[in-house]
Image: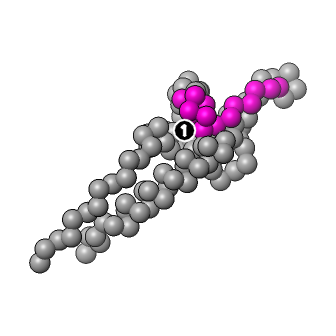
Amino acid sequence: MMDKPLATPPEIDKLIHEPARLQIMANLYVVEEADFTYLMRQTGLTWGNLSSHLSKLEEASYIDVIKGYKGKRPHTMLRLTGKGRTAFETYRQQMLGMLAELPSGE
């Protein structure tokens, strides 16, 4: 029996594909916006690591970073941009399609 060759995988967005950024994007995808502390707790990333990944996503215009104050304390809110939401949806569909093509392990 000849196995059907797998289709060539699509060119995935490597910016999103990195595990920490994938977690950030997935968390922001399901909420309207989130604050920095919430994302830090959800992802388990350190302050510096999360900040670095957010900078890369902001440079790509995938997220908006809104800095302000809550009382006298600095407060950072984050949300996906339209471009970021579209990029994540495309990434998600590509991954689902690629995984659906895999034969079952049975």
The quarter in which the N terminus is drawn is bottom left
Was residue 3 drawn as part of the magenta stretch in this picture?
no
Inspect the magenta stretch and tell me whether residue 57 lies in it.
yes
* Stretch of the chain drawn in magenta: 56-69
User: Does 26 appear above or below 60?
Assistant: below
Looking at numbered disc 1 in the image, what kind of residue is underneath it? Gly
Q: In the image shown, does 89 or 52 lie closer to the viewer? A: 89
In the image, 69 versus 46, the foreground residue is 69
The structure residue drawn at horizontal position 21% and vertical position 65%, both measured from the top left corner, is 5
Mark 1 packing: few (<14 Cα in 10 Å), some, or many (20+)? few
Visible in this render: residue 10? yes
How has the structure been colored for display? Answer: one colour
The percent position of residue 51, horizontal first and vertical second, equals: 59, 27
Quadrant in the picture for residue 56: top right
Q: Position of residue 26 (x, y in %)?
A: 57, 49
Q: Is residue 19 visible?
A: no
Q: Nearer the viewer, residue 78 or 72?
A: 78
Residue located at (73% from left, 48% from top): 32
Residue furthest bottom as drawn? 1
User: How many marks can you see?
Assistant: 1
Check disc 1 and report its element: helix, strand or loop: loop
> What residue is disc 1 on?
44
The residue at 13%/74% (across/down) is 2
Q: Residue furthest right?
A: 71
Horizontal placement of 71 versus 35: left or right?
right
Residue at the image position 54 percent from the left and 38 percent from the top: 44
State the quadrant of the C terminus.
Answer: bottom left
- Say whether residue 52 is left or right of residue 103: right
Point out residue 65 in the picture as x, y percentages from the top left corner: 69, 31
| Image location of residue 7, percent across then percent down | 29, 61
